[in-house]
């Protein structure tokens, strides 16, 4: 089972959206991506990275998310179906339902990571962010 969520991080150049997919059993980050927009393309790209990094057997994986419009988009749900991944969403308004995914944001933000010093240009990512990607 994979759990997923996205969050906004303040940077020196404005908001940066961070999307991640986490394995519910190992608690490891399977994939993540950043963007200047919190849209379906951001979560779809994160999913593509996750699928490319793991051998996913059709019918054997659940992708769990909240009810955000990015996760209910036709783009994402179509890709999940094509990959043979079952889409799962929790109950509306249940803050505990996706806690494992949301817990990642607390860990990243609590550690005092250097997010405010990162610079991003549109959909690209900075050298510092690429280095940070390797550390996760």
Image (cartoon, helix red, strand yellow):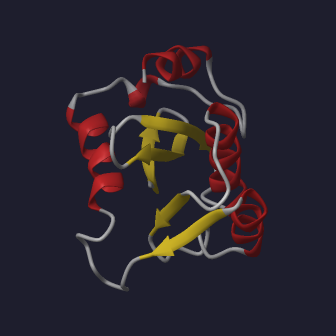
Could you tell whether 26 is left or right of 119 in the image? left
Q: Is residue 68 above or below residue 121?
A: below
Q: In this view, does 92 lie above or below 52?
A: below
Count the labels in the image: 0
Residue 65, position as x, y percentages in the image? 47, 66
Q: Which of 94 and 38 is in front in this view?
A: 94
Residue 52, position as x, y percentages in the image? 70, 36
For the N terminus, the quadrant is bottom left
Q: In this view, does 75 lie above or below 102?
A: below
Q: Nearer the viewer, residue 115 or 101?
A: 101
The residue at 23%/70% (across/down) is: 96
Quarter occupied by residue 110: top left
Q: Nearer the viewer, residue 95 or 120?
A: 95
Quarter occupied by residue 33: top right
Could you tell whether 7 is left or right of 72 in the image? left
Q: In this view, does 125 lie above or below 17?
A: above
Could you tell whether 6 is left or right of 72 in the image? left
Residue 109, position as x, y percentages in the image? 28, 38
Residue 132, position as x, y percentages in the image? 47, 19
């Amino acid at each position: 089972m994979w759990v997923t969520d996205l969050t906004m991080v303040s940077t020196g150049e404005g908001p940066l959206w961070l999307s991640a997919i986490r394995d519910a059993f190992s608690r490891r980050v399977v994939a993540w991506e950043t963007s200047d927009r919190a849209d379906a393309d951001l979560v779809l790209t994160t999913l593509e990275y996750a699928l490319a990094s793991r051998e996913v057997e059709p019918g054997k994986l659940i992708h769990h998310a909240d009810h955000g419009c990015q996760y209910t988009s036709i783009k994402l749900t179509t890709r999940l179906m094509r990959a043979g991944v079952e889409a799962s969403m929790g109950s509306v308004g249940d803050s505990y339902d996706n806690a494992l995914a949301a817990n990642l944001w607390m860990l990243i933000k609590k550690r005092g990571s250097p997010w405010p010093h990162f610079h991003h240009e549109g959909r690209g990512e900075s050298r510092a962010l690429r280095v940070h990607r390797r550390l996760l």
